[in-house]
Image: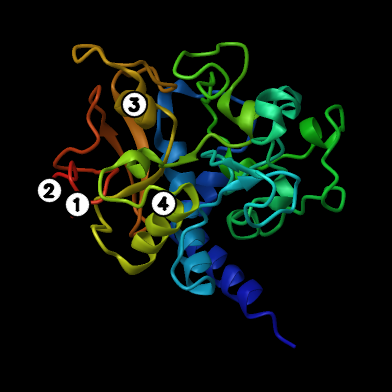
Amino acid sequence: MVNTRAFALREAVASAAASGILLAVLAGMGPGRDIVHGPTRGLSKLGWLGTAAGLYRNDNQNFLPLTLTYTPRGSSRQTNNSLVGWCAWSAAGKNNHPFWFNASGGGFDVEAADRPFNSYAQPDVTFTAPPPPARLPMNDARRLNDQAPALRDDLDSWSYERSWPQRNLTVSTYDDVGTSYLWNAIWWDQPGLPTGFEQRMAAGAQRFASGQGVTPWKFAWLSDPHLSVAALGDTNPKRRLPNWYGHQGKSVMLFVDGHAAYLETLPGRRFTTKWTTVFSDLPGGGG
């Protein structure tokens, strides 16, 4: 039997390599930090992730890999108050830092083996974990040794996730939560969505799948953390947050149509003329 998804991934890899995208991604997987290239390698990696997202959507009724987290591990619906919430690193990436084993009750400690986009984003990497409901132990070597190079930005220098919305300079976002690139949940508190937690996530996911309120070339669904921090965590309209690339007030973004761009962010703004993080047909959605 032919594995059609594996075949499609091989074809996509060949196509990306032919256009130079994958070569740039592979060049950016080394340990060196090249500030001269700034966001170029990050954009290359997001370009590849855009290709992989297209394959994921083809296999999953056009849905993006947005998930809720539950306890115990392996739960798929809310039972006995097992719903924890959402975390923007649940789609893809390596295992979390040991810090997350106990933080927030361990509910956001998402094993790499459980992240649904991993097999598309990096089809040559296999992650393992104990069978659910067992969790990956806090000091398991796989937390530090297993890597997800397609999800690591070379210049990733700090994390906001551990001390939101403050920077934590002791750990990179990648080493903290397993990925430098986080899915956009800025739309979460937009008026007009259902009030129930699971219902709200389902409604947002369905909108991405159907295109309702989504302009594909304008809606950023994945980005470095600076986009969300500027939109949600920074209340000073005159401040421009520094980013990993030595610039201020800019973020690398991946759009629903698969292209990536390095664009200006504005404190407290959830959309501009060039990008949006909210649904256009709901209150506060902009143009």
Q: Residue at x 49, y 39 (%)?
A: 182
Q: CA distance from mark 3 to mark 4?
A: 19 Å
Q: Is residue 40 left or right of residue 5?
A: left
Q: Closer to the N terminus: mark 1 or mark 2?
A: 1
Secondary structure category for the residue under label 3: helix
Residue 9 visible in the snapshot: yes
Q: CA distance from mark 2 to mark 4?
A: 22 Å
Residue at which label 2 appears: 287
Mark whose residue sits in front, 3 or 4: 4
Residue at which label 3 appears: 232
Is residue 125 positioned above or below 186 on the image? below
Q: CA distance from mark 1 to mark 2?
A: 6 Å
Q: Nearer the viewer, residue 222 or 154?
A: 222
Residue at which label 4 appears: 200
Q: CA distance from mark 1 to mark 3?
A: 18 Å
Residue at which label 1 appears: 280
Q: Residue at x 35, y 52 (%)?
A: 194
Number of other residues with Cα within 10 Å of mark 2, as a class: few under 14, some 14 to 19, many 20 or more: some
Tell me the kind of residue under disc 3.
Leu
At which x and y percent is residue 282? 20, 51
Q: Closer to the N terminus: mark 4 or mark 1?
A: 4
Secondary structure category for the residue under label 4: helix
Q: Residue at x 83, y 37 (%)?
A: 142
